[in-house]
Amino acid sequence: MNYHLFVPLAAAEQQAPSSVWFFVQLLALGVVFYFLLIRPQQKQAKEKAALIAAVKTGDKVVMSSGIHGIVANVKESTVLVKVADNVKLEFDKGAIAAVVKASSES
Protein backbone atom coordinates (compact mmCIF):
# COMPACT_ATOMS: atom_id res chain seq x y z
CA MET A 1 0.00 0.00 0.00
CA ASN A 2 0.98 3.59 -0.58
CA TYR A 3 0.73 5.39 2.72
CA HIS A 4 2.50 8.49 1.54
CA LEU A 5 -0.72 9.64 -0.16
CA PHE A 6 -2.43 10.08 3.18
CA VAL A 7 0.30 12.08 4.87
CA PRO A 8 -0.42 15.46 3.17
CA LEU A 9 -4.12 15.13 4.03
CA ALA A 10 -3.33 14.54 7.70
CA ALA A 11 -0.90 17.46 7.74
CA ALA A 12 -3.51 19.77 6.21
CA GLU A 13 -6.02 18.83 8.87
CA GLN A 14 -3.55 19.65 11.64
CA GLN A 15 -2.62 23.09 10.24
CA ALA A 16 -6.15 24.48 10.35
CA PRO A 17 -6.42 24.62 14.15
CA SER A 18 -2.87 25.93 14.54
CA SER A 19 -3.47 28.79 12.09
CA VAL A 20 -6.67 29.74 13.91
CA TRP A 21 -4.79 29.60 17.21
CA PHE A 22 -2.08 31.85 15.71
CA PHE A 23 -4.65 34.51 14.79
CA VAL A 24 -6.26 34.29 18.24
CA GLN A 25 -2.86 34.84 19.86
CA LEU A 26 -2.14 37.73 17.49
CA LEU A 27 -5.46 39.35 18.35
CA ALA A 28 -4.81 38.90 22.08
CA LEU A 29 -1.39 40.49 21.67
CA GLY A 30 -2.99 43.44 19.89
CA VAL A 31 -5.49 43.91 22.73
CA VAL A 32 -2.69 43.81 25.32
CA PHE A 33 -0.68 46.41 23.38
CA TYR A 34 -3.75 48.66 23.15
CA PHE A 35 -4.45 48.61 26.89
CA LEU A 36 -0.83 48.76 28.05
CA LEU A 37 0.72 51.17 25.53
CA ILE A 38 -1.67 53.02 23.25
CA ARG A 39 -4.51 53.91 25.61
CA PRO A 40 -2.35 55.35 28.43
CA GLN A 41 -0.35 57.37 25.91
CA GLN A 42 -3.55 58.86 24.45
CA LYS A 43 -4.78 59.72 27.95
CA GLN A 44 -1.47 61.42 28.79
CA ALA A 45 -1.60 63.43 25.55
CA LYS A 46 -5.13 64.64 26.36
CA GLU A 47 -4.06 65.68 29.87
CA LYS A 48 -1.08 67.63 28.52
CA ALA A 49 -3.27 69.37 25.91
CA ALA A 50 -5.72 70.38 28.65
CA LEU A 51 -2.85 71.63 30.82
CA ILE A 52 -1.46 73.76 27.99
CA ALA A 53 -4.88 75.15 27.12
CA ALA A 54 -5.49 76.16 30.74
CA VAL A 55 -2.24 78.12 31.20
CA LYS A 56 -2.83 81.80 31.92
CA THR A 57 -0.84 84.85 32.95
CA GLY A 58 0.48 84.56 36.51
CA ASP A 59 0.76 80.75 36.61
CA LYS A 60 3.99 79.30 37.97
CA VAL A 61 5.28 76.78 35.44
CA VAL A 62 8.14 74.37 34.89
CA MET A 63 9.40 74.07 31.34
CA SER A 64 10.60 70.80 29.81
CA SER A 65 14.16 72.18 30.02
CA GLY A 66 13.80 72.50 33.80
CA ILE A 67 13.43 76.28 33.89
CA HIS A 68 11.00 77.54 36.54
CA GLY A 69 9.18 80.80 36.03
CA ILE A 70 5.96 82.78 36.04
CA VAL A 71 3.91 83.20 32.88
CA ALA A 72 4.00 86.87 31.91
CA ASN A 73 2.01 86.66 28.67
CA VAL A 74 0.17 83.96 26.75
CA LYS A 75 0.18 84.18 22.97
CA GLU A 76 -1.39 81.96 20.32
CA SER A 77 1.41 79.38 20.16
CA THR A 78 3.97 80.69 22.66
CA VAL A 79 4.23 81.87 26.26
CA LEU A 80 6.44 84.56 27.72
CA VAL A 81 7.95 83.32 31.00
CA LYS A 82 9.53 85.61 33.58
CA VAL A 83 12.49 83.75 35.07
CA ALA A 84 14.17 86.64 36.98
CA ASP A 85 13.87 90.40 37.39
CA ASN A 86 13.84 91.96 33.90
CA VAL A 87 14.44 88.53 32.29
CA LYS A 88 11.67 87.08 30.15
CA LEU A 89 12.03 84.09 27.85
CA GLU A 90 9.65 83.08 25.09
CA PHE A 91 8.81 79.36 24.87
CA ASP A 92 6.59 77.26 22.68
CA LYS A 93 3.47 76.17 24.60
CA GLY A 94 4.45 72.53 24.07
CA ALA A 95 7.55 73.09 26.23
CA ILE A 96 5.42 73.46 29.37
CA ALA A 97 5.99 70.37 31.49
CA ALA A 98 3.91 71.27 34.54
CA VAL A 99 1.94 74.04 36.18
CA VAL A 100 3.30 74.25 39.73
CA LYS A 101 0.82 76.74 41.12
CA ALA A 102 -2.04 78.56 39.44
CA SER A 103 -2.37 82.31 40.01
CA SER A 104 -5.83 81.96 41.64
CA GLU A 105 -4.43 79.64 44.38
CA SER A 106 -2.25 82.38 45.99
Image (cartoon, helix red, strand yellow):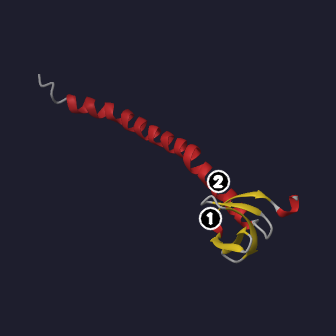
Residue 66 in which image quadrant: bottom right
Circle 2: element type = helix
Whole-percent x, y for residue 28 in the image: 50, 39
Whole-percent x, y for residue 77 in the image: 66, 75
Residue furthest to the front? 85
Q: Amino acid at mark 1?
A: Ala
> How many tags in the picture?
2
Residue positioned 61% across, 60% down in the render: 64
- 54, above or below 20, in the image: below
Residue positioned 32% across, 32% down in the render: 13
- 53, above or below 9, in the image: below
Q: Which residue is mark 2?
A: 44
- 7, above or below 100, in the image: above
Quarter in which the C terminus is drawn: bottom right
Residue 53 in which image quadrant: bottom right
- 106 sits to left or right of 55: right
Residue positioned 36% across, 36% down in the render: 16
Whole-percent x, y for residue 62 in the image: 68, 59
Whole-percent x, y for residue 30 in the image: 50, 45
Q: What is the spatial separation of the Cα atoms under label 1 and label 2, in whole angstroms?
A: 15 Å
Residue furthest to the left? 1
- Count residues near mark 1 (Cα–Cα under 10 Å), then give few for <14, some for 14-19, many for 20+: some
Residue positioned 46% across, 38% down in the render: 24
Circle 1: element type = helix
Residue 6 in which image quadrant: top left
- 26 sits to left or right of 82: left
Quarter in which the N terminus is drawn: top left
Q: Nearer the viewer, residue 69 or 5?
A: 69
Q: Amino acid at mark 2?
A: Gln
Q: Nearer the viewer, residue 100 or 27?
A: 100
Residue furthest to the bottom? 76
Q: Which residue is mark 1?
A: 95
